[in-house]
Image: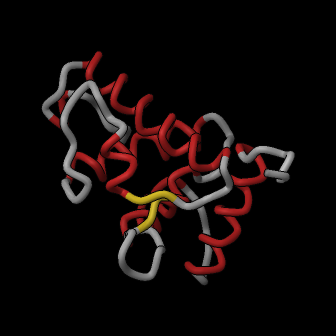
Amino acid sequence: MRRTASQVGLREDQWTTAKHEVRDAIVGAAHDRRLTSYGEVAAQVRVIQVDPASPLMQELLGGVFEDEYDAGGPALTAIVTYQYSDQEPAQSFYSEARTLGYRFSEPHAFWTEQVQRVFSEHGRHDRRR
């Protein structure tokens, strides 16, 4: 079952715009070939206020994950991590991946592979600074 605006208490235009803003924030970090944090992503959402630790943030990330999966892209949300801990995604990332149909036995290896796929697809190719 795909997420909808009404499930999270938003109008359709807010939900769509917020997902685009979340995706743009993540793609910006991927372009620079770096991980990003929940706080950094939430701060770039302008259409609504989003607390980085809120269920709404998790729903937005899940919506982006669903959209990327449907489009055949890598797990873009893999690069969104906890800023002050192990710099890995929340457990919900792995749950969402399994719900979408990804099969893996070693979560860390799956995550590492997806991070590399995200950087390969969305990262800048000229790494000179």
Percent coordinates x, y for residue 77 in the rendering: 50, 53
Residue at position x 65%, y 79% in the image: 109
Q: Nearer the viewer, residue 118 or 75?
A: 118
Task: Please state if 128 lies on the left or on the right of 44 as rendered.
Answer: right
Residue at position x 46%, y 68% in the image: 94
Q: Is residue 9 above or below residue 121?
A: above
Q: Is residue 73 above or below residue 10?
A: below
Residue at position x 71%, y 54% in the image: 119
Q: Nearer the viewer, residue 89 or 42?
A: 42
State which quarter of the image contains the N terminus: top left
Task: Please state if 115 lies on the left or on the right of 84 as rendered.
Answer: right
Q: Quadrant of residue 89?
A: bottom left
Q: Nearer the viewer, residue 94 or 126?
A: 126
Percent coordinates x, y for residue 12 in the rendering: 27, 19
Task: Please state if 73 lies on the left or on the right of 90 as rendered.
Answer: right
Residue at position x 30%, y 53% in the image: 58
Q: Residue furthest front?
A: 129
Percent coordinates x, y for residue 101 in the rendering: 56, 57
Q: Is residue 104 above or below residue 44?
A: below
